[in-house]
Image (cartoon, coloured by chain):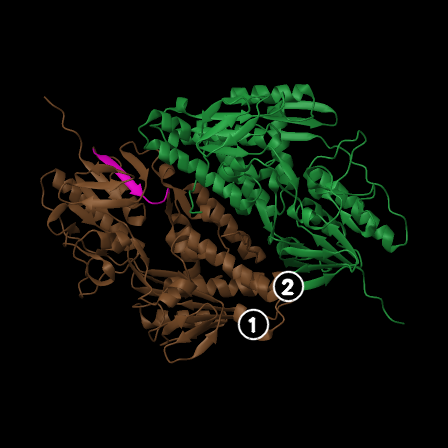
Chain colours: A green, B brown
Amino acid sequence: MIKKAPPHILIIGAGFGGLETARRLAKAPLQITLIDKRNYHLFQPLLYQIAIAGLTPSQIAYPVRSIFRNQKNLTFQQGEVEQINFEKRYVKMNGSLIAYDYLVIASGGQTNYFGLDSIQENSHELKNIESAVAARNHLLSMFELASREADPEKRRAMLTFVIVGGGPTGVETAGALAELIRLVLSRDYSQLDLRDVQVLLLEATDHLMGNYPAELSNATFELLRRKNVEILLSTRLAGYDGSRITLGDGTQIPARTLIWTAGVKASELADKLGVDQAGLGRIKVEETLQLPGHPEVYIIGDSAYFEDGHGQPLPMLATVAQQEAATTVKNIQRSIQGLAPISFRYKDPGLLATIGRNAAVARIAGLSFSGFPAWVIWVVLHIYRLIGFRNRLLVLINWAWDYVFYDSQVRLITAE
Amino acid sequence: MIKKAPPHILIIGAGFGGLETARRLAKAPLQITLIDKRNYHLFQPLLYQIAIAGLTPSQIAYPVRSIFRNQKNLTFQQGEVEQINFEKRYVKMNGSLIAYDYLVIASGGQTNYFGLDSIQENSHELKNIESAVAARNHLLSMFELASREADPEKRRAMLTFVIVGGGPTGVETAGALAELIRLVLSRDYSQLDLRDVQVLLLEATDHLMGNYPAELSNATFELLRRKNVEILLSTRLAGYDGSRITLGDGTQIPARTLIWTAGVKASELADKLGVDQAGLGRIKVEETLQLPGHPEVYIIGDSAYFEDGHGQPLPMLATVAQQEAATTVKNIQRSIQGLAPISFRYKDPGLLATIGRNAAVARIAGLSFSGFPAWVIWVVLHIYRLIGFRNRLLVLINWAWDYVFYDSQVRLITAE
């Protein structure tokens, strides 16, 4: 009797979706190849902490080979996908072909500038370690420059920090930056007048935090205001030349810093595959997360277009990707057993966002929290979710230190 | 009665010499301006730990403004010195002039390639955070590349790591890299044959560790050999094209990695000042560390040329710079009081170098140690010397973790 080779599962992307897929298949009798452009998994929800010098990159990035060191059925390969041939079932990368029996595309998302080139060219984004470190270097350099600038107008422009996007990332960045300035930088640059410093949060709609209940949106607004963040709602950005932002109504605001958190879209890979795409470049999938016409291909996470019960696409969040990974794993296993796939159903686990030191907003099990209780929930959950025990411990020590001493350790300006 | 303005001390460089000078003047009734290209002090003796993914940059770099937050007589300014006018007593930087009463030049050193351009272009150095991170990215990328390279010759070249220079930096780098490979990377890349991996240490003289006693040089040799480092003594490097090294006798060794630790010289600034320089571009100073003809200017550390009792220049070491700082501070204070300056005398505090996990060599109070006792001394002293309590704690946790679990946390390949 000839022993059949175990099925080969190829997973593209070591983000939340790809990682969850690989882990859930740890004990399955199959071969897994996980590929990613980077050699590490990035805990993106804390990326803004890199930008505000609160954490160091290795505290939120974890080498993929470490994570899967003990998972014997998995091989990792670093590289960029050049081509996918759905008919012949192979992926081309690093100059060679990798055949698959099942393919899971979890290639994530990228920043969406909605065609506003001037913003793309002159702003900072929080999408990967390099861009977050660049934002940190820029923020801190502005304080160095301002500390020796005699012209008050130029100085104010250096000390005006504009964050665009009133979703969780924008809110967390604005809150944390305001605190970094008030508690840490104000002591490092004691000769600077804090009244010259401004943190501005711009949001195009008339409320913060997207589709969450009004009480959370209002609590967020109040908490940010108390931390000296200026909030401009119903304000659209028209352009940015690196020294002044232009609003939709033509108003200009001098500012040397703009952090863009107002848009995401599917990864570049989604555009290269020649498949049907919906809004934001996301790939249309079946109810079962399969690619139409290719039941052996699954698309999950930011790159997948899947509507909730109300005709709205699911948001680009780690929890969506992880839940989709769970269904994908079930469906692959059902397919191997000759069973029909099941449909995906998203369960909203709620919302959690910090607004700096000891304040947060949370929506859990239909209940809204804000202020200190929400902050404690946030700290505990995020540290728990960070991969690897040591990371958790180091992050905890870092934060405990900051909390007690109002310090912030990572204020290094490195060369780009 | 008119109150006289306090004397203004300008210190160039926030390395070991500049930092020590500033700290020792903390309680003096004078104004200090400390300037540096970077916004942080770098604990250079541990830079090689960044390159071998053992520590993260923020664990060995500390923001200058943090260090001096409570020192009221000090102002920090980040920037590069454009010009020094010794006659008119000012320094030009960031487009403006800073006048001084006393000037302390502690601008450090830079890598010396002895005119070997091919090496400068194709090798890695351990001189600053950026170069050490670049070395880390390169080392780890070689393992990623080798893991998918079918050609055995190309693979061996990817896994041949050449370190040039048998002084403390070269020895520590070679030992730590050999251990990283044996204990950590061997598990991350379990499909690679470890016999393809080679760590080569090249030294031009016939012994390691420079001028220290033969028993230490021999102990170092033995400890490195036991960690599978190949040592080539009396071997001079003639060139490197990025894929093969050429030795002085014409031998070629295929190797994709070369880390150059074999030379240092005075900083660029020393060349720009139009003053008398001795070997390695170091500036000739009086016995009192004053610049000849300019008693208000002191030169200390790597940029100063000062002979010991035997006609040999003092080595470019942190301890030399720190002791010179102490004498400089005394002499500035004596000058303010109208007293004659004292001469500098160097007291050799000994030598300490690790050779990876639980092995080191040490020379303290005329006694030589090697092996585990020397390693314990090294760990305790280095952690103690790291600035800032939190850094010490984080470094300690990092090392304790590595020691127990043979792990290494910072194995991130970031974009350069």
Q: Which chain carries label 2?
A: A
| Residue B407 shows up from this direction | yes
Residue B351 in percent (x, y) is at: 33, 61
Q: Quadrant of residue A34?
A: bottom right
- Magenta-drawn stretch, dominant element (helix, strand or loop): strand
Look at the numbered disc 2 and give the secondary structure of its residue.
loop
Q: Residues within 10 Å of mark 2 (few under 14, many from 20)?
A: few
In percent of width and height, residue A204 lies at 60, 25
Give the Cα distance between marks 1 and 2.
16 Å
Q: Is residue A26 magenta?
A: no
Chain for numbered disc 1: B
Q: Do labels 1 and 2 share a chain?
A: no
Q: Is residue B123 visible?
A: no
Is A223 left, or right, of A12 in this rendering? left
Task: Tell me, for residue B21, which label it has, or none.
Answer: none
Q: Please check the rendered image and state whether residue B38 is part of the magenta-colored stretch, yes or no.
A: yes
Q: Which amino acid does label 2 sit on?
A: Gly
Q: Name which residue lies at 55% across and 60% down.
A: B141
Q: What stretch is highlighted in magenta?
A: B30-39
**Tag 1: Cα neighbours inside 10 Å, few (<14), some, or many (≥20)?**
some
Question: Pointer 2: what residue?
Answer: A95
Name the spot of residue A53 as percent of width and height, x first. Answer: 48, 38
Q: Is mark 1 on a helix, strand or loop?
A: helix
Judge from the rendering whether residue B225 lies leftward or rightward of residue B7; answer left or right.
right
Q: In this view, does B43 lie above or below A151?
A: below
Asked which quadrant contains residue A142, the reply is top left
Observer-nearest residue: B338 or B189? B189
Which amino acid lies under the numbered mark 1 shown in the image of this protein? Answer: Lys
Image mark for residue B154: 1
